[in-house]
Image (tube, rainbow, N blue to C red):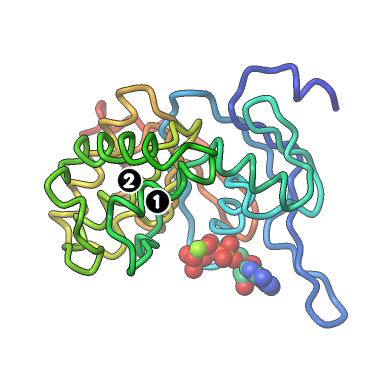
Amino acid sequence: MSEILNDHNLIQMVNIEKSYKMGGSTFKAIENVNLKIDKGEYVAIVGPSGAGKSTLMNIIGCLDNATSGEYSLDGQNTKCNDNKLAEIRNKKIGFIFQNYNLIAKLSILDNVVLPLLYLGYTGKAAKEKAKTQLEKVGLGKHIKHKPTELSGGQMQRVAIARALVTDPQIILADEPTGALDSKTGREVLKMLEDLNSEGNTIVMITHDRDIANNAKRIITVRDGHITSDELNNKEVTA
Ligand SMILES: Nc1ncnc2c1ncn2[C@@H]1O[C@H](COP(=O)(O)OP(=O)(O)OP(=O)(O)O)[C@@H](O)[C@H]1O
Ligand SMILES: [Mg+2]
């Protein structure tokens, strides 16, 4: 399958399957997934609960290996051991989660510094870069605060700063507005839209069709299969 490594897509999946052994039988959470995503795209993955969205995101995000099939990310085959997978993940992916996943006992500056330390930055350089990134999301005055001293929207902005600070190839967002009120949710969606306009590649998982409508391409997953993959013509239909 060398052809998949010669292409210029950022994400290329060929015949990806993820199965779980349950007692004596095997359950296929996703199967027959073929997917290409280019640099600069803004893609939403939608589907009902249990469809396989998080399973797919875990593989895209190099949190987990597929059971079979080929996945290359930025030209690199991801079939590798956990340490190597973690290295690819740290270098290439920025995560935004529904519940922010910030470390409560650390200041928001140190939360954003952390991924840079994993990449080998010195403390001083990491602090400078993290501070600049927090200023970009409008939190320059809050860097000494603990996450619990912030609102939900502010916490999600810290998470966005943390995701961006490593200059990742992809931003992966799993239900990024799920814990926010609708106004704050819209602000976070606007931020994602702006990041995409600046050239960032975004893959967002959501069960909500309206939220998916912010993306330029919508992929639907049902019962572990991609059942549709279409460009979002919201500008035309709005
Ligand atoms: N570790 C696991 N072991 C066994 N089955 C699993 C495991 N993880 C997920 N599954 C099953 O795989 C299927 C897909 O799960 P997944 O979490 O990907 O769904 P989802 O689309 O993200 O759903 P939701 O919208 O509820 O988050 C489900 O039937 C789930 O029970
Ligand atoms: Mg899920």
Q: Tag on residue 223? A: none
Q: Position of residue 99 (x, y in %)?
A: 35, 65
Q: Is residue 217 above or below residue 160?
A: above
* Residue at image coords 68%, 56%: 30
For image coordinates 58% across by 27% down, the residue present is 10
Q: Residue visible at 23% across and 62% down?
A: 180
Q: Nearer the viewer, residue 86 or 79?
A: 86
Which of the two discs, 2 and 1, labels the residue nearer the N terminus? 1
Residue furthest bottom as drawn = 23
Question: The residue tagged with tag 2: helix, strand or loop?
Answer: helix
Looking at the image, residue 198 sits to the left or right of residue 140; the answer is: right
Q: Where's residue 153, x and y in %?
A: 20, 56
Image side of residue 83 versus residue 47, left or right: right
For the N terminus, which image quadrant? top right
| Circle 1 Cα neighbour tier, 10 Å, few/some/many (<14 / 14–19 / ≥20) | many
Q: Quadrant of residue 235?
A: top left
Say whether residue 34 is left or right of residue 188: right
Q: Residue at x 62, y 61 (%)?
A: 223
Circles 2, 1 touching at the beta carbon (< 8 Å): yes
Give the spatial CA distance, label 2 vs label 1: 6 Å
Q: Is mark 2 within 8 Å of ligand 2?
A: no
- Residue 192 is situated, as x and y percent measured from the top left of the image, at 30, 38
Under mark 1, the amino acid is: Ile
Residue 33 placement (x, y as % from top left)? 68, 44
Q: Which residue is at the front of the view, 158 or 24?
A: 158
Name the residue that disc number 1 marks.
Answer: 96
Q: Which residue is mark 2?
A: 160
Q: Check disc 1 and report its element: helix, strand or loop.
A: strand
Please, what is the three-letter code of the amino acid marked with disc 2?
Answer: Ile
Quadrant of the rendered image containing residue 183: bottom left
Picture quarter with the C terminus: top left
Residue 119 falls left or right of residue 18: left
